[in-house]
Structure formats: C-alpha cells, structure tokens
Image (cartoon, rainbow, N blue to C red):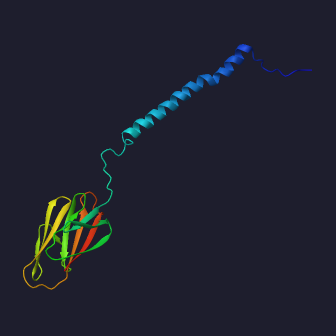
Amino acid sequence: MTHASHPTITATQRACASDEGRWHRPLRRLFGASVVAATLALAGCGGGGDVGVVPTPGIGIDVAVAGTTYGRVSSGQLIEVAAAVGQAIEFDANEPVTWSFSVNGSPLFANGTTVDVGGVTISQVQFDPSRVVLQSTFDGPALLPIDVVLVATSSFDGTQVGTIHLRLG
C-alpha cells in the first residue's frame, strides 16, 4: 500500500510561515499612514484643486429709509419699499454690484443718472462698489406715487440679482 506523501513542515519552517503576516503588516501600516498623511496634507491646502476660487454666498441687499433698516432682499427675491419724496434711501448689497434703476416703467438707467419725473427729481449716487443712495426732491407739483425699480447685479456672479420695488409718495 502506498501512502501519499505530504510535505512535512519543520518547526523552523512553521515559524517562518507564521511570520509571513508580520512582514506585511508593517508595510500595510506604513502605506495606510502615508495615505492618511497625504489626505490631511491635501485637506490643509483646500484639497489641492480649487485654490484661489472664492465662493459666492449670494447677494443680500440691506435697505434703509431715513436711517432705519427696512429689510433685506436676497438674490432672486423682490422687496417692496415705501418712502416719502425727500427721504434718503440707502441700499447696501454687501458685495460689489452693478446698480441700475427704472422710473415708472422706463428703461434701466445707469448709476449716477438723475431723472426728472414731472415735479420730482430722482438721483442715484454710488458711495462705494456695494452701496448707493437714492435721493429725491420736489421741484413743483407732481403726480404721486412714483414707482422706482432698483436692480443690483453681483460683480462676482451675474446670475446673482436682487430687485427692490420702491414706491415714492
């Protein structure tokens, strides 16, 4: 009767066979530590891909009439504001914007324009890249109310637009 021969493992070979995992574990740990270190390094510098990109949180326009804050309008929203002729109305977009305005449905006027609306003069004065003041004065008898629409378009992202509907009475 023939016996199948099985390899015999000596004590020395058995020790080496069980040590095989010990040689791989330090390499795996070193590799894992390298991956963690690289991840942390990239996270510290913003991920490595978007350096210099400034996110736009969205336009937010604060409206103040005669020194009292009236409300805030965000991109895509419309706010209705009422004021008397002669009151200073301040608009602050809190970021650089391009301002334009319309009176009683007229085409949009650029910043710095003065419009005479039959007895009322309306001027838009820009103080800095984010803030304008709308000034109005009576020049004679006027047909009130006067509808003014102000539009602020973000200088960073042209899709960010805030609109204020102002009724002067």
Q: Is residue 129 left or right of residue 3?
A: left
Residue at position x 15%, y 77% in the image? 85
Residue 87's spot in the image, x, y percent? Answer: 16, 72
Residue 84 versus residue 36: which sits nearer the camera? Answer: 84
Q: Is residue 2 above or below residue 160?
A: above
Image quadrant in which you'd find residue 49: top left
Residue at position x 44%, y 37% in the image? 39
Q: Is residue 53 left or right of residue 121?
A: right
Residue 29's spot in the image, x, y percent? Answer: 54, 28
Total marks in image: 0
Residue 136 versus residue 106: which sits nearer the camera? Answer: 136
Can residue 26 be seen in the rendering of this structure? yes
Residue 143's spot in the image, x, y percent? Answer: 15, 86
Residue at position x 68%, y 21% in the image? 17
On-image quarter of the C terminus: bottom left
Residue at position x 32%, y 69% in the image? 77
On-image quarter of the N terminus: top right
Q: Is residue 38 above or below residue 159?
A: above
Image quadrant in which you'd find residue 61: bottom left
Can residue 107 be seen in the rendering of this structure? no
Q: Is residue 132 above or below residue 22?
A: below
Q: Which residue sits furthest right?
A: 1
Residue 150's spot in the image, x, y percent? Answer: 22, 71
